[in-house]
Image: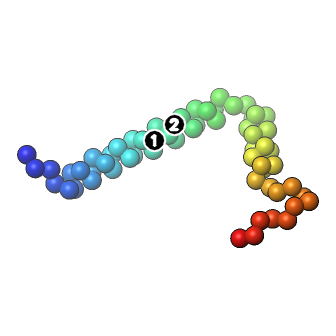
């Protein structure tokens, strides 16, 4: 029994779609369990981590 490359590619594609769907579903479940205040606090924490302190210049590109 010989497998064609397109069959292997198709199976890999289906697996990739299923994995992506599982990751998205998990992320949405985590967000659904958080209250709006928790979401806001988390966003503020991420913003503070992303911004350099005011006394330091931004990193050179």
Q: How many marks?
A: 2
Q: At 16% across and 54% down in the image, what residue appears?
A: 4
Classify mark 1: residues with Cα within 10 Å, few (<14), some (14-19) or many (20+): few
How far is mark 1 from mark 2, CA to CA?
6 Å
| 17 to the left or right of 32 | left
In the orientation shown, which residue stands out farthest toward the top? 33
Q: How is the image coloured?
A: rainbow
Classify mark 2: residues with Cα within 10 Å, few (<14), some (14-19) or many (20+): few
Q: At 15% across and 50% down in the image, what residue appears?
A: 3
* Residue that numbered label 2 is attached to: 25
In the rendered structure, find residue 53 and report the number of the disc placed on it: none
The quadrant in which residue 43 appears is top right
The quadrant in which residue 37 appears is top right
Vertically, is 52 above or below 38?
Answer: below
Nearer to the camera, 47 or 27: 47
Residue 45 drawn at (x, y percent): 78, 43
Q: At 77% across and 49% down in the image, what residue appears?
A: 49
- Secondary element under disc 1, as helix, strand or loop, is helix
Residue 24 drawn at (x, y percent): 52, 41
Vertically, is 9 above or below 39?
Answer: below
Q: In which quadrant is the C terminus drawn?
A: bottom right
Nearer to the camera, 58 or 19: 58
Q: At 31% across and 48% down in the image, what residue appears?
A: 12
Nearer to the camera, 56 or 26: 56
The quadrant in which residue 33 appears is top right
Q: Are marks 1 and 2 in contact (CB under 8 Å)?
A: yes
* Residue that numbered label 1 is attached to: 21
């Amino acid at each position: 029994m010989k497998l064609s490359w397109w069959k292997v590619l198709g199976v890999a594609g289906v697996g990739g779609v299923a994995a992506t769907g599982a990751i998205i579903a998990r992320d949405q479940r985590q967000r659904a369990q958080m209250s709006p205040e928790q979401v806001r606090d988390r966003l503020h924490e991420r913003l503070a981590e992303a911004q350099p302190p005011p006394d330091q210049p931004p990193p050179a590109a």
